[in-house]
């Protein structure tokens, strides 16, 4: 099969002119009017376009985009297939980041579901909807591990842990592509942003990145490896530099590591006009230099700045750039187009799909992604006889709940929280009175006075997260804190429902809130799920895929850090006052944390054999560990049991905890089950600075529990 593909590529290449080859490396943005369409048709007709991005602005996540237009895409494709000399189809790509018409939770939330099977099912629904609208290629998953919630794009990614990021990266690639992305209802995926964009200095977008190879191989690269191992069709290179070397022009990252080390064999597309950035980054003077540098580095397709279109042929004809480099890039593009089946099925034939089933999947994933952060005196769930006063800036918000990076979700199809609460109470004795004006003190007081319990819809708009939307302060706004304070002063129970894209700093508001549900921006079903969780029709099971900090000033503070020289790692309670005198550096809510309405207990770790030789381990032997999980509460529910390791002594400093496995299980109230884990060579090692994976003999600690701070520990030993 693969050989046939390569033979077909050879045959095509042998017949292509240089200009036609360059055309395959050019991505242009979608036409926005008739004249634009005619101009684009002419370029397609003369073989100068390889791909069309179905967006017309560089921040498609922020600016409303045109709806998809299948008939326009088929019209353009017909020109490519039937009127161009080579008849090579174009490939249509779009930012299908976390949904299409049905919007799933933002990836930072769905990573916290710790349910990759469900994530894969949801992205299969997304692929079906997008493919039906003419999208053949999604610029997703975004897998940028990030420790800085000031960065607006943290919402698009998998949080702070490389293992969880890898599991979710694979799930989304498989959701989009299945086992064969040439199948109807499957689309090519694009893992991004390769590489290190999530470590942008200060959480400022597009800024410089300082990254050691040690961090690169152990923290940043794993989810890209997972995507490549899952067969991801394409990779998108990132805007940023790493240690002064722009990724766009780095052979080390785009060829040596991506292809030589990870074995990627699809194609690399630049981020929006990233070749042009090379001049701003001060490594190139002319457009032609940018084009030559990017191609030499291994960047196959140029997104929308036409530097390849305008300069590559001349660079080859002048001998500056070998044609073989162009051929190589064209091979990569043709390999994906052939694997997508575009030559056999270049056109989109709209069909039907079960939108109701997709919404049910979105509901399920939102239900497993929302995180119960606090529930004093088990105030939640509320009785359906309660008189609820509802206030807060997001109580009647629709668009925000979808989250950033939503091109095809419809605000008008999205319930707001007030409606959802009314629906959830429908037919019950309970009532919900919605405050009309949160700013007017007396209005709110009147509504509070008529209630048994106060629910505050807090958080942030989607417009302060996403691309180019970083925040210098991640605390809840003063207005929201004062509303919480006023509600608290009534002496009634106060529930905070936080609709957010990033883990907001809740320290100031927290004392005023008896319960806190982080509802995130969970897509189409956010409001319904938040209401059903509040009223006990659902039991929360989400966990935090990112640490919730007390204050912005603690950034970066994350669970998988190494110990300080004097063991003053506040995250783990080691002398937090040594870290900051004013606000001790402990997390507000740690990684992997989330409450339920029921109560789970985990037994001490059982392990038959706690030591073995390095040789035995290398030969495949594993430590067999187990715990007994009990549901001792009154509700059926799901718990995510997490396994962390600590390499106590190694040739380099190792993190105090590293997530290496997890299992999410359902248990009926009063029930219990045994949970087994295997820990072997693949879980106990790390990557050296040269990318070599090693396991060093010595003592390790294994932790198994319900978040990274669990003290349920067992020591194991690997003998030399
Ligand atoms: C944007 C983003 C990238 C997106 C691309 C196309 O600038 O960085 O994630 O896929 O351009 O819209």
Image (cartoon, rainbow, N blue to C red):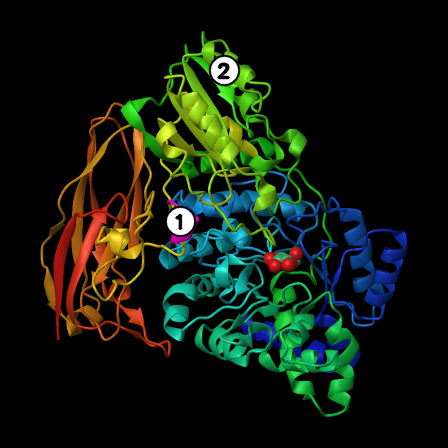
Which residue is at a point 24% across and 48% down the rendered structure image?
709
Secondary structure category for the residue under label 1: loop
Which residue is at a point 53% across and 68% down the rendered structure image?
208
Report crowding for label 1: few under 14, some 14 to 19, many 20 or more residues within 10 A (C-alpha): many
Percent x, y for residue 705? 23, 45
Classify 116 as above or below 567: above
Which residue is at a point 35% across and 23% down the rendered structure image?
380
Q: Is residue 708 magenta?
A: no
Question: What residue would you read off at disc 2?
Answer: 445
What is the quadrant of residue 671 in the picture?
A: top left
Give the mark toward the camera: 1 or 2: 2
Could you say which is closer to the camera, residue 560 or residue 566?
A: 566
What is the quadrant of residue 56 in the picture?
A: bottom right
Question: What residue would you read off at disc 1?
Answer: 546
Residue 18 as seen in the image, left or right of residue 677: right
Classify 644 as above or below 429: below
Quarter of the picture holding the C terminus: bottom left
Report the magenta residues as a range: 550-554
Percent x, y for residue 457? 50, 28
Percent x, y for residue 290? 68, 78
| Picture quadrant of ligand 1 | bottom right
Of all residues, the one furthest to the front in this rendering is: 582
Q: Is residue 336 visible?
A: yes
Classify 632 as above or below 604: above
Could you say which is closer to the camera, residue 404 or residue 335?
A: 404
């Amino acid at each position: 099969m693969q050989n046939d593909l390569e033979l077909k590529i050879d045959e095509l290449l042998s017949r292509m002119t240089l200009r036609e080859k360059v055309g395959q490396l050019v991505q242009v943005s979608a036409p926005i009017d008739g004249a634009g369409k005619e101009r684009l048709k002419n370029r397609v007709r003369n073989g100068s376009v390889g791909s069309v991005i179905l967006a017309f602005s560089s921040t498609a996540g922020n600016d409303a985009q045109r709806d998809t237009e299948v008939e326009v895409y088929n019209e353009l494709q017909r020109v490519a297939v039937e009127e161009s000399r080579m008849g090579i189809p174009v490939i249509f790509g779009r930012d299908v980041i976390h949904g299409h018409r049905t919007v799933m939770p933002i990836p930072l939330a769905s990573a916290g579901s710790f349910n990759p099977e469900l994530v894969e099912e949801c992205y299969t629904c997304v692929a079906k909807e997008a493919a039906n609208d003419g999208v053949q290629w999604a610029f997703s998953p975004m897998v940028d591990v990030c420790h800085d919630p000031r960065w607006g794009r943290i919402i698009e990614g998998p949080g702070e842990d490389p293992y969880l990021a890898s599991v979710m990266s694979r799930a989304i690639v498989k959701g989009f592509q299945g086992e064969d992305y040439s199948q109807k209802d499957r689309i090519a995926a694009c893992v991004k942003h390769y590489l290190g964009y999530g470590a942008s200095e200060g959480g400022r977008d597009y800024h410089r990145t300082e990254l050691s190879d040690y961090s690169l191989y152990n923290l940043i690269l794993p989810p890209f490896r997972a995507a490549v191992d899952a067969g991801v069709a394409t990779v998108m290179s990132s805007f940023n530099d790493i240690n002064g070397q722009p990724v766009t022009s780095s052979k080390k990252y785009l060829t040596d590591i991506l292809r030589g080390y990870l074995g990627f064999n699809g194609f690399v597309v630049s981020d929006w006009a990233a070749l042009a950035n090379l001049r701003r980054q001060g490594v190139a003077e002319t457009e032609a230099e940018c084009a030559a540098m990017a191609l030499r580095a291994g960047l196959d397709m140029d997104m929308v700045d036409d530097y390849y279109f305008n300069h590559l042929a001349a660079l080859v004809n002048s001998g500056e750039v070998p044609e073989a480099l162009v051929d190589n890039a064209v091979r990569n593009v043709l390999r994906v187009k052939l694997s997508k089946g575009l030559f056999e099925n270049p056109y989109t034939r709209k069909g039907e799909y079960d939108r109701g089933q997709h919404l049910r999947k979105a509901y399920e994933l939102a239900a497993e992604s929302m995180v119960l952060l606090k529930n004093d005196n088990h105030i939640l769930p509320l009785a359906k006889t309660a008189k609820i006063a509802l206030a807060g800036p997001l109580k009647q918000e629709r668009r925000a709940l979808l989250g950033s990076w939503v091109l095809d979700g419809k605000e008008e199809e999205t319930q707001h929280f007030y409606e959802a609460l009314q629906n959830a109470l429908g037919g019950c004795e309970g009532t919900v009175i919605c405050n009309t004006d949160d700013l007017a003190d007396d209005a709110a007081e009147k509504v509070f006075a008529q209630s048994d319990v106060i629910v505050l819809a807090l958080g942030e708009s989607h417009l302060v997260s996403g691309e180019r939307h970083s925040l210098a302060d991640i605390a809840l706004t003063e207005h929201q804190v004062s509303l919480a304070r006023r509600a608290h002063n009534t002496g009634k129970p106060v529930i905070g429902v936080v609709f957010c894209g990033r883990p907001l700093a809740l320290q100031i508001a927290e004392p005023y809130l008896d319960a806190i549900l982080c509802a995130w921006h969970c897509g189409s079903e956010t409001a319904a799920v938040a209401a059903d969780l509040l009223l006990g029709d659902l039991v929360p099971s989400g966990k935090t895929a990112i640490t919730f900090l007390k204050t912005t000033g603690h950034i970066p503070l994350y669970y998988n850090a190494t110990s300080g020289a004097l063991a003053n790692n506040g995250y783990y309670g080691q002398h937090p006052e040594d870290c900051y005198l004013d606000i001790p550096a402990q997390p507000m809510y740690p990684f992997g944390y989330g409450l339920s309405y029921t109560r789970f207990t985990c037994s001490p770790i059982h392990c038959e054999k706690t030591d073995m030789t390095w040789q035995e381990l290398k030969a495949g032997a594993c430590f067999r560990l187990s715990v007994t999980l009990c549901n001792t509460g009154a509700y059926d529910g799901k718990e995510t049991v997490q396994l962390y390791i600590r390499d106590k002594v190694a040739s380099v400093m190792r993190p105090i905890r590293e997530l290496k496995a997890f299992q999410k299980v359902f248990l009926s109230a009063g029930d219990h089950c045994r949970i087994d884990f295997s820990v072997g060579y693949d879980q106990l090692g790390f990557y050296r600075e040269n990318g070599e994976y090693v396991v060093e003999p010595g003592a390790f600690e294994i932790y198994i529990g319900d978040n990274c701070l669990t003290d349920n520990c067992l020591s194991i030993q690997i003998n030399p």
